[in-house]
Image (spheres, coloured by chain):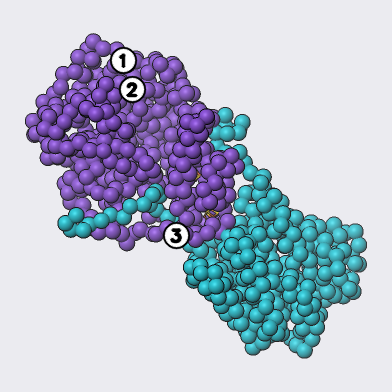
Chain colours: A cyan, B purple
Amino acid sequence: MPDQKLYLVSYAPYWHNGSSVRARSYDYILAALPAVFMGILQYGVPAFRVVAFSVSCAVLWELLLNKAMKKPVTIVDGNAAVIGLLLAMMLPATAPWWAVLIGALAAILVGKWVYGGLGCNPLNPPMVAFAMLMLSWKGVVDFNAALVNFDLGFDMAYPPASLKYFGASAVEDFTVWGLLMGRQSGGIGTTFGLGLIAGGLYLILRGHVRWEIPASFIAGILITASLFHVSDPARYGAPIFHLLTGSTLLAAFFLIGEDSSSPVNRIPMFLYGALGGFLTVLIRSIGIYPDGVVFAVLLINICNPLLDKIRPKAFGKGAQDA
Amino acid sequence: MIQRPFFNLGRRPQLPYPVLSQDALGALKDLPPPDRAVLLYKGPGLAGASPSIKRGDGVRTGQRLLLESGGAAPLVATVTGRVADISSQRGNLGKTYSSIGIDVTPRDEQDGEFFKIHKEGSPEQMLGYLEALPGMPSLSPLLPKAGPVRILIISGMDRDLLITSNQFLLKTETDALAEGIQRLKEMTQPDRIIMAVPPGSVSDAEKTGAEISVVRPFYPNGNPRLIVKDALKKAVPMNKSLEEAGIAFLGVDAVIALQPALVKGEIPIHRVVTVVNKDMGAIHARARVGTPVRKVLEALNIETGHGDRVVIGGPMTGRTLYAEDEPVLFDTEGILVQDRSHILPVSDTHCLNCGECVRVCPARIPVNILIRFLENRLYQDAVDVCDLSYCIECGLCSYVCPARIPIFHYIALGKHEFAQQMAEEAAHA
Ligand code: SF4
Ligand code: SF4
């Protein structure tokens, strides 16, 4: 061609709705910020240190793995940063640097890349890392031991642990409003209920988190906890208490809805969420861990591929259309 | 480009079809005939050693040219002139075309053969002749050998977004349409005739005397399979063609094209196309079939540059052009010009499993699993586990994918490769 005018040739469609992986990641980060800020406000520099270090480590591990595996560099998609941030949110402000470093490696390597990277992980990466830290170095994530030197003006005992070991009377002093406003001890980004709910609603409205999953998870928690509570009010906490303590809200809005490890069809989403809520309360009430969220989430992650097999028949295939 | 709303609550995208209203139709622009017309025969053609024409031969409007010895691969000329070149071309996914360039003489000379058939021949002969018009959709569902036509569905919807040719014709050529439908009715004696139209065209469609099925004007409701489901309140199983189900499906454009032929024995030579400029402004233009896209754009003063995209059809399912030499044919509903600054590149990011595609798919296909099979070329599994063959080809999955995977391209390739595999197995069996 004399004028070298070449057209771009590609396959349909020629429109795109403009969504991208990067935008999703940044929205997650944005949504998490209120809860993170509250944590930093409460615990000060130590909390900031954990958050900053965790995010940097996650991104650096991702970069190193990209290079080691000779794959395209994927840190710009923001997923590693999200993983680092969510991990930091679950950790206490006193988490030592080596635990954060190892945790970030576990999340990025064992949680994500051994399966092939973004979208291939069957389990939630920050949860995998947290579970590993919990099983390997119990003290690191024992909130009562970790936060013993802080006095923020409220009961610094970790609420789920108090409930577990001392019964419902030990947590009588927590008010719903106090829990919502973060007047409880716990992970850096898990205590500010209102912030987590606001962030979660933002993600749902933006369409990044399917409402079915948090809704059914919360319903699962409330219903199961009510049953326990009714059976023995002195021993088992009130449903709302379960909902607002530990990492329940963080899990509901930021962890269980993670794309790769959660179902995409509607009925499976409901089952998945409800099962998660049920298991959380079950482990808290009769298991050995004060906060059941970690293992509940990993268990439902495992169920996900099976659950997602429940799907409608294709158009023009089933009896419903023919 | 219609972007996702900031807050979308995970709902399906609502992509409205443009709905034309009577007072905002705009003028129809008549384009001059080209100096050099190109006619395409979509099929192998040119396989026989001696096509009935060669370079330098004179061609009359309406003349039937045979591209293979033995009378196969007929193509009806829509211009008068002299054959300048004959070639075969390759298109997407192994498709082959024969292309005939004709230097057009300004005065049309009519070939009498069709007129004679119209007078004396049978409907089969007539439809067989018309089917050979370049780009004319298959008319075989109208023929008795396909079994009786039980239902004739005429779509006044356009298949793709931005394109409004069918709506425009429905509003501006209502009488011709009614007459065409009447002729088709006499020829095929269907039990029912249904017109599927967007809400704004109901009163026009009623003038044809057909039953009306109102289609909600949101993409992909203009898809033939979905129109049929809407009109009949049940879907034709995907393992059956519409024809096998006794349904003849035609667009308003096809009926308008057939009308002069069926009524007066005149070979149709024009078609109305929607030309969508870079600013998404649409113009309706009537072009001689065979006019190269370049001439259409020139006549409408639409400039294109390096790196732009020129699409035959609409933004969801159209086909991009390598060069502007491709002609307007009877199935050219529209031409879309996209500025290079509006083009979002696809990516090779892995699927996130976000499920957007699954929730948007009108065929309820588990696209998140399907894409994994397709990326790994496991076509058999794609068909068995993920219902690949049930895809109605709307392109929405690619449109919503945040990983920007060219899913629809993978699907087209998958269907093609699977058909290929099946053919090979059949040959070896
Ligand atoms: S193109 Fe995609 S969204 Fe449309 S029917 Fe096929 S798989 Fe479903
Ligand atoms: S929309 Fe894209 S990223 Fe999301 S599940 Fe479908 S293919 Fe995967």
Up-down relation of residue B197 to residue A143 (above or below): above
Q: Position of residue A161 (x, y in %)?
A: 83, 74
* Spot occupied by residue A228 in the image (x, y as percentages of width and height): 86, 60
Report the side of A149 relative to B63 (left or right): right
Q: Residue furthest top?
A: B120
Q: Amino acid at mark 3?
A: Ser
Q: Tell me where residue B93 appears, x and y as whole percent.
A: 39, 43
Whether ligand 1 has any atom under 8 Å from the Cβ at mark 1 is answered as no
Chain on which label 1 sits: B
Q: Earlier in the sequence, mark 3 or mark 1?
A: 1
Residue beneath label 1, please? B123
Viewer-closest of A122 and B107: A122
Indicate which disc, 3 or 2, sits on the residue closer to the N terminus.
Answer: 2
A290 relative position to A320: left or right: right
- Quarter of the image with the N terminus of chain B is bottom left
Question: Looking at this view, is A103 or B122 the one in front?
Answer: A103
Quarter of the image holding residue A96?
A: bottom right
User: Which kind of residue does numbered mark 2 sit on?
Assistant: Ile
Relative height, residue B217 to residue B136 (above, below) = below
Distance from Cα at disc 3 to Cα at disc 2 = 46 Å
In this image, A83 relative to B270: left or right? right
In front of the other: label 2 or label 1? Answer: 1
Cα–Cα span, label 3 and label 1: 51 Å
Residue, disc 2? B181
Chain ID of residue with mark 3 = B
Number of other residues with Cα within 10 Å of mark 1, as a class: few under 14, some 14 to 19, many 20 or more: some
Q: How many marks?
A: 3
Q: Residue at x 82, y 70 (%)?
A: A290
Q: Alpha carbon of mark 2 to alpha carbon of mark 1: how far?
A: 15 Å
Residue that badge 3 annotates: B347
